[in-house]
Amino acid sequence: MLKGKYTPECYYLNKLNDYPSNIENFVLKPLFSFAGSGVEVDIDKLKLDSIKDRKNYILQQKVEYAPIIDTPDGFSKVEIRMMFLWLEKPVLVNNLIRTSKGKMMGVDFNKNKTWIGSSIAYHR
């Protein structure tokens, strides 16, 4: 549970007494999932109230990706994931660039779309 100026708000569902008033700006995520399975992007109070196993879910503030890469059939959104190793200080050792035209990043959320996927960025 990271906290900071550039970190999305995040709450364990079972620890919330009240939902955020701007619930449309949050997603519901299972703690143990892979490739976005089980993530609910469009949620409301009724959906949250229906979750039985609340200790295994988080409510996380949505990240709005900017459609920035111009492709032949429309703009694509970009997410950059960076992996750091802590040596004497954090050192960037790898990254993953993901592109999307759907509501979420990942293959399952971009079916029948083109110019999406993942790549790598070079850095010094």
Image (tube, grey):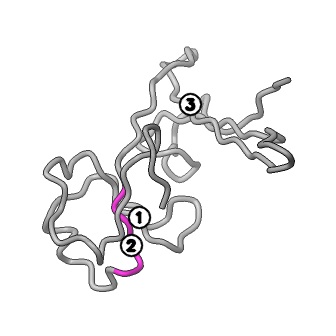
- Tell me, for residue 57, which label it has, or none: 2
Q: Which residues are magenta?
A: 55-60
Name the front one of labels 3 and 2: 2
**From mark 1 to mark 3, how far is it between C-alphas?**
20 Å
- Tell me, for residue 78, which label it has, or none: 3
Q: Disc 1, disc 3: CB below 8 Å?
A: no
For this view, does 82 lie left or right of residue 67? Answer: right
Residue 5 located within the stretch drawn in magenta: no
> Percent from the top left, x then y, of residue 96?
72, 40
Residue 57 located within the stretch drawn in magenta: yes
Q: Nearer the viewer, residue 81 or 3?
A: 3
Q: Furthest residue to the front? A: 88
Q: Amino acid at mark 2?
A: Tyr
Which sits earlier in the primary sequence, circle 1 or circle 3? 1
> Percent from the top left, x then y, of residue 109?
48, 48
Q: Nearer the viewer, residue 109 or 14?
A: 14
Which sits earlier in the primary sequence, circle 3 or circle 2? 2
Q: Nearer the viewer, residue 60 or 37?
A: 60
Q: Disc 2, disc 1: CB below 8 Å?
A: yes
Q: Amino acid at mark 3?
A: Val
> Percent from the top left, x then y, of residue 54?
32, 80
Q: Residues within 10 Å of mark 2 (few under 14, many from 20)?
A: many
| Residue in view at x 45 percent, y 25 percent | 66
Q: Amino acid at mark 1?
A: Lys
- Tell me, for residue 29, which label it has, or none: 1
| Residue in view at x 17 percent, y 74 percent | 49
> Percent from the top left, x then y, of residue 117?
65, 38
